[in-house]
Image (tube, rainbow, N blue to C red):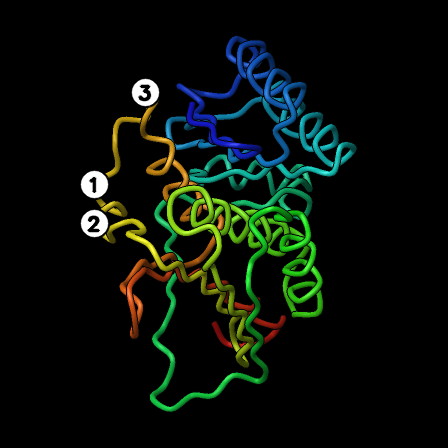
């Protein structure tokens, strides 16, 4: 299990059945009780989920929603996905199927945003920054779960920039295009090297919090890139979230 702030990823070590459910429930309940409001349940090792497992997912989903949080499933096998669909649960819990990839096409050359806004972060009032981001993003065609995730990922990027670089020089830019929203968090310090995306530190290392933060941002956004600023010193963390394809449209 990897945790940072109010985000956690929990791996199910085997099938989610009557024998494994109590342990998973204790883990999830402990996270929720401690204030965690975003849990990604990694089902990569679960080839089967029985009625007890389905009941656990439903109960924890309801509990998270009651406290304003969100539970989602990732690496869900075809068999488990089919079971979730037959139980009418696939419409209520965000699911990423095993082997699925989020394809984020490059923006066409010269593409202009529908709108763009940039503002400076007040390091002493990060809550105000988060509220401003949420207000900007809530008007976009994102699902509730996508909006929840992008708000968390953006807040994580801002917090990292303030904590690890130049607290007084962090800028946030939100740009809405026809098919996506892009959030850039720019700092004026050393930032983090893009290689961190591939060479994350051991999650058991107490000094690897930033590595975990990047990994979890990648769970929450469709694309995360880190690059040097085009002018001056510092780095830019770019988060991209694609808008859902309308029903009936070609995917």
- Taking the image as shown, residue 175 lies to the left or right of residue 137, namely left
- Asked if marks 1 and 2 touch (Cβ < 8 Å), the reply is yes
Q: Which of the two residues, 81 or 150, is positioned nearer the viewer here?
A: 150
Disc 3 designates what residue? 204
Callout 1: few (<14), some (14-19), or many (20+) C-alpha neighbours within 10 Å? few
Determine the secondary structure under disc 1. loop
Q: Which residue is mark 2?
A: 195
Question: Which sits earlier in the primary sequence, circle 1 or circle 3?
Answer: 1
- Of residue 33 and residue 132, the one placed in the foreground of this image is 132
- Residue 243, quarter of picture: bottom right
What SS does tag 3 mark? loop
Q: Residue at the bottom extreme?
A: 110
Q: CA distance from mark 1 to mark 2?
A: 6 Å
Cα separation, mark 2 vs mark 3, equals 19 Å
* Left or right position of 226 against 156: left
Residue 197's spot in the image, x, y percent? 27, 47
**How dense is the environment of label 3, judged by Cα within 10 Å: few (below 14), some, or many (20 and up)?**
few
Q: Which residue is mark 1?
A: 199
Q: Which sits in the foreground, 42 or 120?
A: 120
Which of the labelled discs sits on residue 49, or is there none? none
């Amino acid at each position: 299990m990897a945790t940072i702030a109010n985000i956690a990823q929990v791996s199910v070590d085997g099938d989610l059945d009557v024998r494994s459910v109590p342990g998973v429930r204790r883990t999830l309940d402990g996270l929720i009780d401690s204030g965690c409001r975003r849990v990604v349940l990694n089902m990569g090792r679960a080839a089967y989920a029985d009625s007890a497992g389905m009941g656990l997912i439903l109960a924890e989903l309801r509990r998270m929603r009651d406290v304003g949080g969100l539970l989602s499933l990732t690496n869900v096998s075809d068999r488990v996905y089919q079971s979730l669909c037959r139980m009418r649960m696939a419409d209520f819990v965000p699911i990423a199927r095993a082997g699925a990839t989020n394809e984020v096409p490059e923006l066409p050359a010269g593409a202009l945003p529908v709108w763009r806004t940039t503002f400076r972060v007040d390091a002493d009032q990060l809550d105000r920054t988060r509220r401003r981001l949420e207000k900007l993003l809530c008007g976009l065609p994102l699902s509730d779960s996508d909006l929840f995730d992008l708000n968390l990922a953006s807040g994580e990027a801002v917090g990292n920039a303030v904590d690890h670089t130049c607290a007084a020089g962090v800028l946030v830019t939100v740009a809405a295009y026809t098919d996506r929203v892009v959030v850039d968090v720019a700092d004026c310090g050393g930032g983090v090297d893009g290689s961190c995306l591939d060479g994350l530190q051991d999650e058991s290392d107490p000094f690897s919090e930033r590595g975990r933060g990047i990994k979890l941002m990648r769970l929450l956004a469709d694309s995360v890139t880190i690059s040097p600023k085009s002018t001056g010193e510092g780095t830019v963390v770019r988060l991209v979230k694609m808008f859902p394809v309308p029903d009936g449209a070609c995917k």
